[in-house]
Image (cartoon, grey):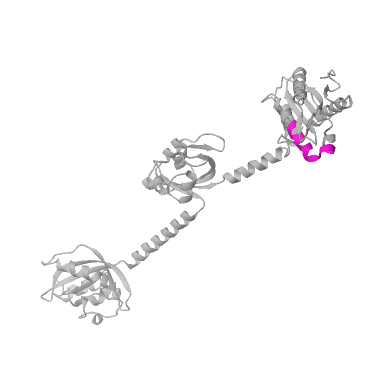
Amino acid sequence: MQPGDDDGWQLLVDHHPDAICVHDGQLLLFANVAALNLVGVDSAGEVVGRPLLQFVDATSAAALIERIAGLTQLGDTSAPSVMRLLDADGSLRTVQAQSVRTRWKGENAYLAIMRDMTAQEMAEATARRAEQRFTEVVEALIDGVVVHDRRGYIRSINPAGAAILGVDVHDAVGSSIRTMIDEGRIRRADGVLITPFDLHRRPFTSAPSRYELELTPPRGQTTWVRCATSVIGDGAERHLITSFTDITAERDATARLQYQARHDALTALPNRHDILDTLSAALSEQDRHHDIAVLYIDLDKLKAVNDTYGHSVGDEVLRIAARRLASVLPPGSSSIGRVGGDEFVAVVSGGSCAAGDLATSLHQSLDSPIPVRDAQLVVRASIGAIRVPPGDTRTVDQLLRDADIAMYQAKDSGGNRTIFAAQDPIVFW
């Protein structure tokens, strides 16, 4: 049954969901209801007999003419193609069209079947715009964003991420994140080095996670980053998206605050709070079998230096003396901190003999004159020492009190000497 042969054909196509029209290459001969709706008219009389190209956008006209010109035999069918139509008010509609060479009322004609693609095109355009906006937002972020697949190959990276990792955006895309690890170094906050498996395999089998890493890329400076990872997609399209924020300055600031909270600003030695914590930790050590010695040190006659040369010189003398005192402490087993104006406390592991040897070294460290302005100043120290054997039940405050008393005994005895607390034999150096 050919189009136009009887009324049955028209009944069949009139209510077909796709737009169907018949034309002879010049004029429209027939349009079903869906085709009328497509161009925004109410009746066939508004389109039948009118020029075909009146309803075709100029950008699609040449392709349409070329397409139907190739249909030379009855039944020839064109490949589906996308074209643009003009509706009654001049608006554009995108359709997918396919033409068939046929006959209409005994004459050669063309049957066109069209499917409206406008909604799909709008949805795709909206999706493209959304994707473009998303891309623009990601690229503008100061946080780094990296997407990689299960094999560890980077699928996308924004400029901030490339800058933090010390790589070029174009070089990074398609490369393996394993290469970055092998050439550089990635370490967790607890100091454990991260392996390629840890970084791009394990997160695929775990819940979204947050963590901190120290990155040492092959190019660029070591950076601390706070990361958040999650898996996106399904099956072969599963990818890991990682965002990371440069927290180097934040960590540096925190480290400075922590250092300042536990160190003396003038001498850079541990402050009173820190040295008392050191002594408390030493006293609370489980199953301690060795002595602890506490040495309370006071610089002799520093007030005279301040009165004669001024506090700026006194501060410089204090700094130099502090460095000298700290330089003779055995590493790992002792600590010294400034606990007052010209007072220091040293905590040392070992018996009274070891403490005596250390006291001697402390006195000797001050033997050399300290050059200030045009003078050579010699600073001495009075030291009160106390031995803390295993099982000693005195508190930190009590130990400092006893050591302080011994120090004042040394000072009252003329200074420049060490005296052990009264319960121990008094020894002079």
Residue lying at 89% horizontally and 26% vertically, measured from the top left: 412
Q: Nearer the viewer, residue 128 or 363?
A: 363
Q: For residue 358: magenta?
A: no
Which residue is at the far bottom?
45
User: Does residue 242 appear in this view?
Assistant: no
113 displayed left or right of 143: left
Total numbered labels? 0
Q: Quadrant of the C terminus?
A: top right
Residue lying at 71% horizontally and 28% vertically, measured from the top left: 326
User: Does residue 273 appear in this view?
Assistant: yes
| 259 to 28, vertically: above or below | above
| 29 to 97, vertically: above or below | below
Where is residue 122 shown, x and y percent of the image? 36, 66
Residue lying at 75% horizontally and 22% vertically, measured from the top left: 361
Where is residue 380 shown, x and y percent of the image? 81, 27
Majority SS type along the magenta span: helix
Toward which corner of the image does residue 171 lie, by quadrant? top left
Q: Which residues are magenta?
A: 306-321
